[in-house]
Image (tube, rainbow, N blue to C red):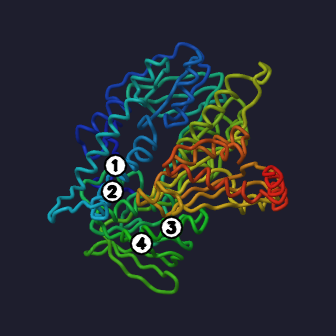
Amino acid sequence: MIPQPSQRTILMTQQDEPLVLPDDEYNRQLLANVHPSGWVNPEPTGRYNIVVIGAGTAGLITAVIAASLGAKVALIEKHLMGGDCLNVGCVPSKGVIRAARAWADLRNAAEFGLHIPAGVKYDFGAAMARMRKLRARISHNDSAHRYTKLGVDVYVGSGRFTGADTIQVEGPAGKRALTFAKAAVCTGARAAALPTPGLQDAGYLTNETVFSLTELPPRIGVIGAGPIGCELAQSFTRFGSQVYLIEALHGIMPNEDRDAAEIVQQQMLRDGVKLFCCGKDLNVQKTEAGKRLTVDSHGQQYDVTVDEILVGVGRTPNVDGLGLEAAGIKYDKNGVTVNARLQTTNPKIFAAGDICSRYKFTHAADAMAQIVIQNALFPHPLGLGYASVDSLIMPWCTFTEPEVAHVGMYEKDAKEKGLEVETYTYKLDEVDRAILDGEDEGFARVHIQKGTDKILGATIVAAHAGDMIGEFSVAMKAGAGAKTIAGTIHPYPTQAEVNKKVVNLWRKAHFSQGTKNFLIKLFGWMRR
């Protein structure tokens, strides 16, 4: 599908220069940082220790760490430095989510004794301009000029392997031939095209195009109730759009515990989202009135017309045009094939990030980049040992309201591995700060291996779950168990107290009646 120019976030001009829409001062500042006009690629002056293709999170981290260690590094990016995270992912989406939450807070202000007079003006265009302004400000961190100052040779253009240890860069000013000792493929992934009948003809938005909007669509259909779909569906309904959320499976967030997802689902329904889950036979038709969606949900046929469609499901790895065959790198529909060391089928070449990982998170790409550095630049004979992706403890968070954060195993995962697990859940409506904040819908849940205090996994549903899950992540990484969290002083009153309260349930469960009977006798003797 080729989106209409008014819908596209990024266009390529005839001079192969990107134009980020809308063309305003903030997006021009963004481009000046991440794809500067007239950039002159350096002339190679010998073999590189490592050449990195792709300047998203994985590529940027790989390049900057390698350069800081003294390696000779080349970084190649044909599009926008910062990748999805900065340009069309984490950064703009969280800016939009924050603005939508402010709108929702205003509508709920009476609960806190604040009476908003009628006629308050809501300006979607201003909210989106704020997002673009902040994205431009943050873009300095990923800029071509900054990385050059840090010792990285930045090449703007398309990188393609021409052999087992050679890459050709084709930029606006011509071609450059690079040779390397090691290389890293960090080209990420993009929104996938869905085979939904009529969708291509009607046109649709993805995370790569939705942030170009300057006017609020009165009606919007969102396909996919995973993290992207849920975050943006809730945001747009809070802005004032009528949102129809369509999910093929039951409920929302199908990978999370059902009771965790249900809390978010109920909040989204209160916000005004219309959910069509267990959706079947989805069809799209372009009409004069808009984009017509028909879908069967729980045996009932629905027929709605919307102004925009947002597809929030499916990712396709960016493997095209890289010359992977010339370098002996195997790949498939899931991306580049790597081992636990993130080494491709060419032992000189590694990969990191969405191009090879089932974890499509910025922080996962960051962690994988550090594994690439250790394994590519510091061979095992030096005594440093190999780093393995299998050892990663990966937290994640969906930034709805409330948020849902998780780390480690779910209960079903532990049982599939043959581990006996004890699961404890503590609700936020018993946590003082959550009650006072009016944010008491949620819980903390921890899975502990039976017979030990080892934490296997945890889930938090809370307004700030993404911040709170870190305590469990640190404990699991450090090998510290439930006893450590239970014995740690938490400031009162905070919502993070729930972490201590949930592990205290485990401690209480293991305080046996026999022990209590012994203490009763002991204290009785001490009174004599």
Quarter that holds the N terminus: bottom left
Name the amino acid, label 2: Ala
- Mark 4 / mark 3, whichever is N-terminal: 3
* Separation of marks 4 and 2 at Cα, in angstroms: 15 Å
In the rendered view, does 100 fall on the left or right side of 194? left
Note whether residue 439 is visible: yes
Please, what secondary structure does the residue beneath circle 3 have? helix
Q: Is residue 253 depicted above or below 165 in this figure?
A: below
Q: Residue furthest top?
A: 45
Q: Quadrant of residue 381?
A: top right
Q: Secondary structure under badge 2?
A: helix
Distance between the alpha carbons at the discs numbered 2 and 1: 20 Å
Report crowding for label 4: few under 14, some 14 to 19, many 20 or more residues within 10 A (C-alpha): few
Q: Is residue 374 above or below residue 47?
A: below
Check disc 4 and give the amino acid type.
Leu
Q: Earlier in the sequence, mark 3 or mark 2?
A: 2
What amino acid is at disc 1?
A: Thr
Q: Earlier in the sequence, mark 1 or mark 4?
A: 1
On the image, numbered disc 3 is attached to which residue? 263
Residue at horizontal 53%, vertical 72%? 251
Q: Earlier in the sequence, mark 2 or mark 1?
A: 1
**The disc label shown at residue 494, or none:** none
Mark nearest the camera among 1 and 4 is 4
Label placed on residue 9: 1
Label ID, residue 269: 4
